[in-house]
Image (cartoon, rainbow, N blue to C red):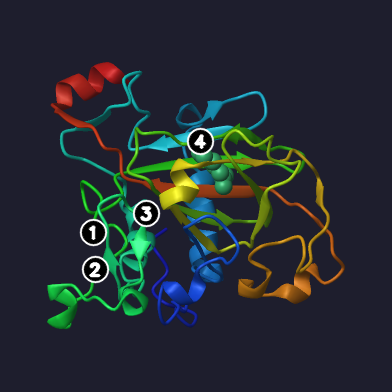
Amino acid sequence: MSPPRSPSPPAALPPSLSSVQIPNLPNSAYYIPSFLTSPEESFLLHKVLSAPQPTWRHLSHRRLQAHPSPLTPQNILLDIAGKGLPDWLREPVISRLRSIPVEVATSSDGDIEDATTEGQHTEDQDNGKRDDIFAPSPHTSPNHVLINEYHPGQGIHAHEDGDAYFPLVCTVSLGSHTVLDVVRKGVGEPHSGGWRILQEPRSLLITTGEMYTGCLHGIAGVEVDEGLNEQGIVNWGLLGDRGEYAEGWKRRGTRISLTYRDVVRVKKVGKAFGGLMR
Ligand SMILES: O=C(O)CCC(=O)C(=O)O
Ligand SMILES: [Fe+2]
C-alpha cells in the first residue's frame, strides 16, 4: 500500500502558527484539527496495525512501537546504517509539519516567539524565507516516532518527556479522540485539575517551551470522556468539529498516537551492529 496521492482535498494548514496557539495555557501549545485527511489516516493505521508482532512492546495498559528503534538506556538513538525513519512515517507527516507557516523568529530554547508581535524579523524573514518548527532543533527534523495504542479505558500516567529529546513534540492522533491532562510540575496530579486538551482524530498537537519543560501530561484511563465543553476544554475554540462533542461527553474508540520528536544524542553504527541488536 503506497501513501494516498491526494484522493481527497489536501489537509488545510492554518494561515499561521500563532493563529492556532491554545489560549490560557503555559507557553506553548498549538492545535491543528484535520492535519491529516481520512485516507491518510487509514493508510497510517494500516501501516501501524500491519507491523510484525515483535515490533510491538507490550505494557500493562497499552502497547507501543518505537521507530527507527528504542533509545538505549543512556537515551541515545542508534542510527543503524543511516536508515532513519521508514518512508511511511516521513510522508506525508514530516513535510507537512515542516510546512506549517511559522512567520516568526525562533529562540534557542525551543519556544516559538511570534516576531510579528515582538516587532522583530530574522534576516531570513526579511528575505522572504521562513523557519519551520524544527529549525531550532539539533537535527532540524524529527528523527524518532513513538507509537502508542490505547483501547477505551486505557491511558498513560502523568509524566514528562525529559531531556533525551529537544523540547518539541508533535502528536498526531488516529482512530479516536482523547483528552490530554496537563498540570504544572509540583502542583498536584493531572486528572484532578490543570488543563484538558481534546485531541480529535487526524489532529496535530504541538507542545514546546514551558509546556514541555514545566508541565506533566497524562491521559486518564476512562472509557467515556465527560465535561467536554467550552469551560472544560482549553482548545474548544480550535476544534474542527465541536458538533461531535455537543452532548458534553463522548465514548472513546481505539486511538493510536504518533509522537514525532528529535532525539538529541544520535550515534552512527554499522549494519552488522544493527543485526546484533535485533
Ligand atoms: O498518546 C499520547 O498522546 C501521549 C503519549 C506520550 O505522552 C508519550 O509517548 O510520551
Ligand atoms: Fe509523553
Inspect the image, locate mark 4, and give the three-letter code of the amino acid beneath it: Glu
- Spatial distance from mark 3 to mark 4, Cα to Cα? 27 Å
Q: Which residue is mark 1?
A: 135
Q: Is residue 240 visible?
A: no
Q: Disc 3 on helix, strand or loop? A: helix
Q: Secondary structure at mark 2?
A: loop
* Left or right for 228, reference 255: right
Marks 3 and 2 close (CB-CB < 8 Å): no
Q: Amino acid at mark 3?
A: Trp
Do the residues under discs 4 and 1 have CB atoms within 8 angstroms?
no
Which quadrant: the N terminus?
Answer: bottom left
> Where's residue 105, x and y in %?
26, 68
| Residue 267 drawn at (x, y percent) | 18, 29
Between tags 3 and 1, which lies in front? 1
Q: Is residue 180 left or right of residue 72?
A: right
Mark 3, residues whose alpha carbon is within 10 Å: few (<14), some, or many (≥20)?
some
Q: In terms of secondary structure, where does tag 4 sit?
A: loop
At x 42%, y 35%, the residue is 66
Pointer 3 residue: 88
Q: What residue is at 37 percent from the left and 77 percent from the top?
A: 117
- Residue at 32% of width from left, 43% of height from top? 166
The answer to which of 195 and 137 lies nearer the viewer is 195
Task: State yes or no: discs 2 and 4 in contact (Cβ < 8 Å).
Answer: no
Label 1 beta carbon less than 8 Å to ligand 2:
no
74 up-or-down from 62: above or below: above
Q: Position of residue 39 (x, y in %)?
A: 52, 68
The foreground one among 87 and 31 is 31
